[in-house]
Image: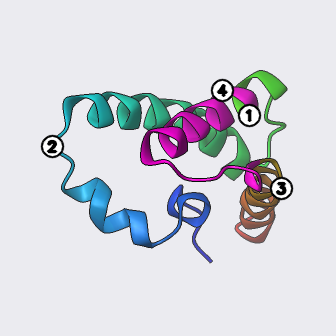
Amino acid sequence: MECSIFEILGPELAGRIAEVSDPEERAILEYLSAAYYQVYEYGIKGAPVSRHRVDRAKHAIAQYYQFLGRDDEMLDEQMESHISSLHKLATESE
């Protein structure tokens, strides 16, 4: 099992992200990457992820969805599920 930001964003964005040339989109993705990395780092260790970090990552993802004109109504559920998956990976690797 792999846990990455693409599980939240969806596989169709993976190719798009690899070829971003728009400076505004690139800046949003850099913010998203930094915000998500903090969630990932804590989650993969099985440590509690602070609400602040989760909210920052959700905000960054919502900002990217808004840029793309995409709906983010499932984001809360996706994020909580993703953190649970990270914690599960942490316990399996012990």
Q: Within 10 Å of the Cα at label 3, are there few (<14), some (14-19), or many (20+) other Cα atoms?
A: few
Whole-angstrom CA distance, mark 1 to mark 4, is 5 Å
Disc nearer the start of the sequence (2/1): 2
Whole-angstrom CA distance, mark 3 to mark 4, is 15 Å
**Looking at the picture, does residue 37 appear above or below residue 93?**
above
Mark yes or no: residue 28 visible. Answer: yes
Residue visible at 61% across and 45% down? 40
| Tag 4 residue | 56
- The mark tally for this picture is 4
Residue visible at 79% across and 35% down? 49
**Looking at the picture, does residue 46 appear above or below residue 93?**
above
Disc nearer the start of the sequence (3/4): 4
Q: Nearer the viewer, mark 2 or mark 1?
A: 2
Q: Nearer the viewer, residue 46 or 20?
A: 20
**Looking at the picture, does residue 25 appear above or below residue 80?**
above
Residue 48, percent from left and from top: 84, 37
Q: Quadrant of residue 63?
A: top right
Whole-angstrom CA distance, mark 1 to mark 3, is 12 Å
Residue 68: which numbered mark, if any? Answer: none
| Tag 2 residue | 21
Disc nearer the start of the sequence (2/4): 2
Instruction: Write down the region rendered in magenta.
Output: 55-75
Circle 3: element type: helix
Image colouring:
rainbow
Circles 3 and 4, Cβ within 8 Å, touching? The answer is: no
Q: Within 10 Å of the Cα at label 4, are there few (<14), some (14-19), or many (20+) other Cα atoms?
A: some
Circle 4: element type: helix
Q: Inspect the image, locate mark 3, and give the three-letter code of the amino acid beneath it.
A: Glu
Residue at the extreme top of the image, as rendered: 52
Circles 1 and 4, Cβ within 8 Å, touching? The answer is: yes
Residue 77: which numbered mark, if any? Answer: 3
| Tag 1 residue | 54
